Image (tube, rainbow, N blue to C red):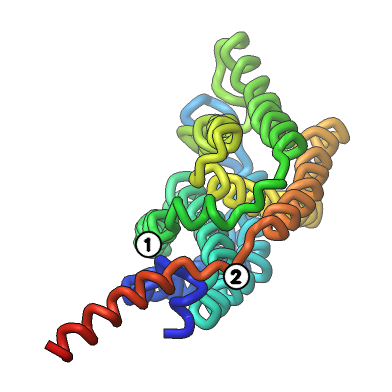
Amino acid sequence: MEAFKNYPYASRSDGLLHTLTLLILVLSLIASGTGLFYSTDGVPYDFKNQYGDIVRIYGSGLYANDSFFRAPIFRGTDFTVFFIACPLLFVALLLDVFKNTLKTRLLLTSLIGCVLYYATSITFGVMYNFLHLLYIALFSLSFYGFTAAITSIDDAFLKESISESMRFKGVTVFLVFTGIALLLAWLPDIITALQAGRPLLLIETYTTEITYALDMGIIAPLCFICVYFLKRRQAIGYVLLDILLTLCIIIGVMLPVQTIFQMNAGIELPLPVLLTKVASFCLLAAFAVYFKIQLFRNINDTLKLIEPEITFRVSRNEDAILH
């Protein structure tokens, strides 16, 4: 009962969320660990794609059928998930099981959201390989786990727990800038391709660009939606803010790692690309760390709004016994 006092919406249904999180963690470790450590004797080779372009194929490991340009990116992503996201998710799970506070639930929710982003990317963006069923399972578990985590957060209690002195001017600027940055990072590639009347420059053997779809279709609009809710101090705004900040931090770590993997593979990246699509996101990640710290400092985890309800229920039981 002690755990429930700090977290008024804690219940036995949390066992489902924690079970889903554990399964998500296990599948994430398998997926990322296989992509990172599994190797074969294959060698790179050239392939003529459906657009008539010659594409260099990676030829070895889990991503043998992916392009020579993309495979190191996938492996860099796997490295980040295996060594950073998964350990953080494990710690968040333990904290939520044993402390069961608003902060631990927000942390757990945001990290499951990061895994959902990863699962969506590999499920729809990687060429078919023998882990395809595992990808689908991870995508499903992270989707429903993310939904369960968000719906487990009580709006009224969250609003009551946020300090009234918290200001949103800085974070509003950050969210607007992030939303615009995501659009500017990828939109020119599509416009240039449309103007030239040809596919995307790096579409290679793929039918679509999943990163463009996720960042411009979901994450960028979510930044502006979050601003809308924060301006009205609605509870979902704080939840979305923490999710976006955590995702921004993880991506800010992931991009340099992906770049290192590409460079180790012998891929040369132009300086403008490094500045616009790596350094800028690292800078955003640094700001995200600052705003996440500020958010958590303004959350009061000492409220015990459930106690009156518990007292009422106990009183009713006592009355029933006396009569």
Residue 121 lies, in percent from the top left, at 51, 48
Residue 72 lies, in percent from the top left, at 67, 53
Give the SS element for disc 2.
loop
Residue 141 lies, in percent from the top left, at 37, 62
In this figure, which residue is indicated by the disc labeled 2?
A: 302
Give the SS element for disc 1.
helix
Q: Residue furthest front?
A: 323
Q: Residue at point 52% right, 82% down?
A: 98
Is 259 situated left or right of 211 in this image?
right
Q: Residue at point 59% right, 37% down?
A: 230
Q: Name the one closer to the observer, 199 or 177.
A: 177
In the depicted structure, whether residue 135 falls above or below residue 284: below
Amino acid at circle 2: Thr
Q: Residue at point 28% right, 80% down?
A: 315
Q: Name the one closer to the observer, 147 or 234.
A: 234
The crowding category of the residue bearing disc 1, from other C-alpha atoms within 10 Å (few below 14, some 14 to 19, many at least 20), is: many
In this figure, which residue is indicated by the disc labeled 1?
A: 141
The crowding category of the residue bearing disc 2, from other C-alpha atoms within 10 Å (few below 14, some 14 to 19, many at least 20), is: few
**Could you tell which of marks 2 and 1 lies nearer the N-terminus?**
1
Residue 87 lies, in percent from the top left, at 62, 73
